[in-house]
Amino acid sequence: MLFENAIVGPIHSRRLGSSLGVNLLPLKHKYCSYDCIYCECGWNRESEQGVLEYATPGELSELLERRLRQLVEQGIGVDSFTFAGNGEPTLYPDFPAAVDMVISLRDRYFPQAVTTVLTNATQLVRPEIFDAVMKLDNPVLKLDAGTSAMRCLINRPSMPGDGRPQGCSWDELLDRLRAFGNHGIVQTLLFDGTSDGQVVSNILPDEFGAYVELLKSIRPKYVMLYSLDRATPEKSLRKLSVDELEVHADVIRREGIEVKVYG
Ligand code: SF4
């Protein structure tokens, strides 16, 4: 499912309440430094053609302000201004300016709302992106694995020279997540399954144990555990029940880290 508008909603979100989406990336086109086997936008290769055209921060500001005026007139509330959409929002060429623009409009129209980004965290190695994400109330940072090998199987990160937007190494990712510390919210999609005949699962005991050790070193504000919600490009993945999520959440909670479960 690809977003066809720059401003989406507000829609009701399991995690964020009434969420007004800001999709910074080209419409009808996925653009990401990962290619997760569960990605709701589909595989990158199905989408990587054509010229990438972005709206400018000024154009986005006009679109967003027009929508906000409508919402105020209609008496519709917003709980979260959420950067999300067709891929990785921090790959937008002027992400810091977009953050400042959204914070400014939030302050003017819905000052009680929070600002949120759903990010795979691979661009946090760029200081200007780290600083911009730090300004947001809810930086939701993806961590799906306990080991570099499982990250490769689940998130399928881009490699130097493969023509995809570049991300960062496993060690760099962990370093940046630790630097975020308790301002960051770690989000993890738990599942198990297979891909190309290989087991791909972040709930294998060793894998989950390594992941919990990483959380202990990151000490995030809290952890969001969630399960598959929509169709995935890899078909042989199993959605965990809420009970299974809660069993895993309790392991993390025993380390003194708050967990919220979204089944
Ligand atoms: S990081 Fe998000 S947008 Fe990118 S491939 Fe993974 S799920 Fe899709």
Image (spheres, grey):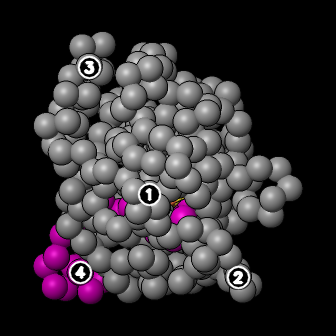
Horizontal arrangement in the rendering, residue 146 relative to residue 95 (left or right): left
Q: Mark 2 or mark 3: name the one nearer the start of the chain.
A: 2
Which one is closest to the eye, mark 1 or mark 4? 1
Label 2 to label 3: alpha-carbon separation? 43 Å
Q: Is residue 183 above or below residue 217?
A: below
| Type of the residue with mark 3 | Val
| Type of the residue with mark 2 | Gln
Residue 87 quadrant: bottom right
Q: Are marks 1 and 4 in contact (CB under 8 Å)?
A: no
| Image coordinates for residue 260, horizontal then vertical, percent | 22, 37
Q: Residue at x 44, y 57 (%)?
A: 38
| Image coordinates for residue 163, horizontal then vertical, percent | 80, 63
Few, some or many C-alpha atoms within 10 Å of disc 1 (few <14, some 14-19, many ≥20)? Answer: many
Label 2 to label 1: alpha-carbon separation? 21 Å
Chain part drawn in magenta = 69-89
Q: Mark 1 or mark 4: name the one nearer the start of the chain.
A: 1
Horizontal arrangement in the rendering, residue 199 relative to residue 78 (left or right): right
Label 1 to label 3: alpha-carbon separation? 24 Å
Q: Is residue 112 visible?
A: no
Labelled disc at residue 38:
1
| Type of the residue with mark 1 | Tyr
- Residue tagged by mark 3? 251
- Residue tagged by mark 4? 71
